[in-house]
Amino acid sequence: MTPAGRTIIRAFTHARWGGRSLICLYISILSGIVVALQYNPTDPFYSTASLELVVPYGAFWRALHYYSSQAFFLLLLCHLLAVIAKNEQTSDRIAWVRLSAVIPVTILLLFTGYVLRGDATGAAAGAIAEHIALSIPGIGKPLNTLLFDISANGILKVYANHLIGLMALGCLCVWPHLQKYRSSFRLHVPLTLAVFAGAILLTAPMEPDRIGLTHIAGPWFFLGLQELLRYFPPLWAGVIVPASLIIALFFLPRQGKNRKPVLLFMALWLIGYTILTGIGAAR
């Protein structure tokens, strides 16, 4: 490996990405509790809008929950990249799969958060997700009933999964890991202040329905998938293509000659998805 490559790896590993992502998760959970106390899933858009207009500091708490959640996901990805680059993933395959499962669980948490807004973006994202789930042969209908079921029950199940189901699943995946590695706010004061400053200065996104609205861009991490849906059936674009990356991550060899092809596939997948995301963002 070149000196530049070793420097990049050291920068990733020495930055304590895992501890930083954990701090953002703490902030997201605490602010999420405040938001949930004022949220009514039977009228999501009005509930979200009134949170900002009526509840004291409501806009701040919603922004804090939104930006801390985004920061948690991005820092979690940095932590994962650092582990892979340093070849430090555990040799226990079951433990590695359990820890890696945090990525799709986190994506679902973020995604359901967008749906719960009840705005144009959330409504469109929920409808697309339900359509993708129903496209899965055999298990599509029960899976949709478990996760979304928006057309029949509104966002009540999405709300329950966001607050309880997915949170419990995420805790189950990482709890043994968190028992070994802990983090505290006093170790990450600059990051904590930055997240709070972002919540004060930046407004959390909200996209109300507008007459003549012909294109709705989904969440930033969903744009590549949304673009794929323009060219491929829902089963391929929404299930098989994303699942291929997760499966590759689950079975990434810790060492040996089989590691490089898997890493190459993952890198090409991410490059392709980034390009599709750029195309989707430019529409």
Image: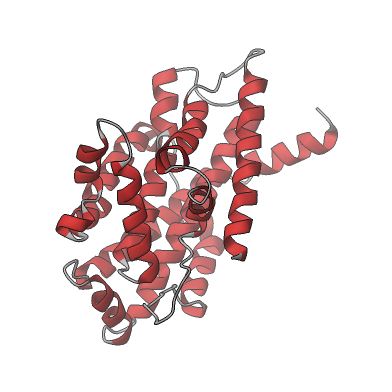
Relative horizontal placement of residue 178, taking residue 231 as reference (left or right): left
Relative horizontal placement of residue 12, taking residue 172 as reference (left or right): right
Identify the image quadrant of the N terminus: top right
Q: Quadrant of residue 179?
A: top left
Residue 138 visible in the snapshot:
yes
Relative horizontal placement of residue 135, taking residue 104 as reference (left or right): left
Residue 86 visible in the snapshot:
no
Q: Nearer the viewer, residue 157 or 3?
A: 157
Name, please, the residue furthest toward the right: 3
Q: Nearer the viewer, residue 156 or 216?
A: 216
In the displayed structure, would residue 153 be above or below residue 48?
A: above
In the displayed structure, would residue 48 be above or below residue 20?
A: below
Identify the image quadrant of the C terminus: bottom right
Q: Position of residue 266 (x, y in %)?
A: 60, 33
Residue at the image point whose x is 22% and y is 70% from the top: 39
Q: Nearer the viewer, residue 230 or 265?
A: 230
Q: Position of residue 190 (x, y in %)?
A: 56, 63
Residue at the image point whose x is 46% and y is 77% from the top: 203
Q: Position of residue 191 (x, y in %)?
A: 54, 61
Residue at the image point whose x is 34% and y is 51% from the top: 129
Number of numbered labels in the structure image: 0
Q: Quadrant of residue 137?
A: top left
In the displayed structure, would residue 253 be above or below residue 219?
A: above
Relative horizontal placement of residue 134, taking residue 233 as reference (left or right): left
Residue at the image point whose x is 48% and y is 68% from the top: 215
Which of the colour schemes (rainbow, by chain, secondary structure, one colour) is used? secondary structure
